[in-house]
Amino acid sequence: MEAGSQYDAAASFDPLRPRLTRVAYRMLGSVADAEDVVQEAFIRWMGANRVAVREPEAYLRRTVTRLCLDQLKSARRQRETYIGPWLPEPIVEDEDDEEDVTLPLMLALERLSPLERVAFLLHDVFGQSFNEVAATIRRDPAACRQLAARARAHVREARPRFQVEKQRGLEIANAFFAASRSGDMTALGAMLAADVSIHADGGGKRSAAPAPILGFDHVMKVHKALAVLFRKHGSEFVRAGFINGLPGFVTREADGEFQTTALEIEDGKVTAIYVVRNPDKLRHLH
């Protein structure tokens, strides 16, 4: 391929790369997989008849979506053998997710078929018409409407009912870090809902609970034990931020590895704690 042609392809593709990566990540829940998909789309873009493409962004989003569909089919098989709870790779931002695809919603999407997931994201999140969705996934519009409706019914409970104010969310995250690391169980308990849960993803690479920990008493028991370890070995606060749309924080633990903690908050109480410890999912934070 001529260098000029490659340069032209990159010049039109690179401004779109961040948005395409965002689309792919929302579909796959993996930063590395999203980047691989977008790079494959670029390779195909270099070989395409670009002069004939009237809307490059729409064309490339369609290409990325189809590649994601292929990836989702194999990802479902990989999830079946994953050790312990699976959480999406954490994206840490200073502001919460403008597309309202929070971590609980991403987990709910995991329960959908690949076609349901794509139809829901394209229509309900990215605002595409069902005609556009149909052209992307090669189904008729009526079928796409049914796919999105089924998905919507499954994920309805995962949509935030009461959006926590941004600054208040970060204040709770900072207070949670301070109480959990210092062993102030009174302060920590005051933040937790009665039905609070912990979901920890170690992926078999670092220690983590093999199943979700459910209920106030069990969560408090875990944090009492963790506080003893934190006093002995320390837990360095790196930064607060929004992790997949939820307030939380990044820490560096005693083994030198990063860890992310995201908090689902309703009515001022923490209802779920999502901890990613799998180092494979944290490499991009470096």
Image: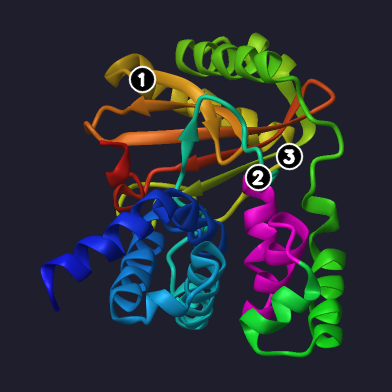
Q: How is the image coloured?
A: rainbow
The kind of residue on which mark 1 rests is Val
Query: Around disc 3, counting alpha carbons within 10 Å, would you say few (fewer than 14), some (14 to 19), or many (20 or more)?
Result: some
Q: Give the alpha-carbon distance from disc 1 to disc 3, as whole Å.
A: 28 Å
Most extreme residue toward the bottom, as rendered? 139
Mark 2 touches mark 3? (CB < 8 Å): no
Residue at horizontal 59%, vertical 11%?
175
Q: Residue at x 65, y 10 (%)?
A: 187
The residue pinned by badge 1 equals 238
> 123 or 13: nearer the eye?
13
Residues rendered magenta in the picture? 101-128
Label 3 SS: loop
Q: Would you place residue 277 above or below residue 141 in this image? A: above
Q: Secondary structure at mark 2?
A: loop
Dot 1 falls on a residue whose secondary structure is strand
Q: Main secondary structure of the magenta part?
A: helix
Instruction: Name the residue carrying label 2.
Output: 102
Q: Amino acid at mark 3?
A: Gly
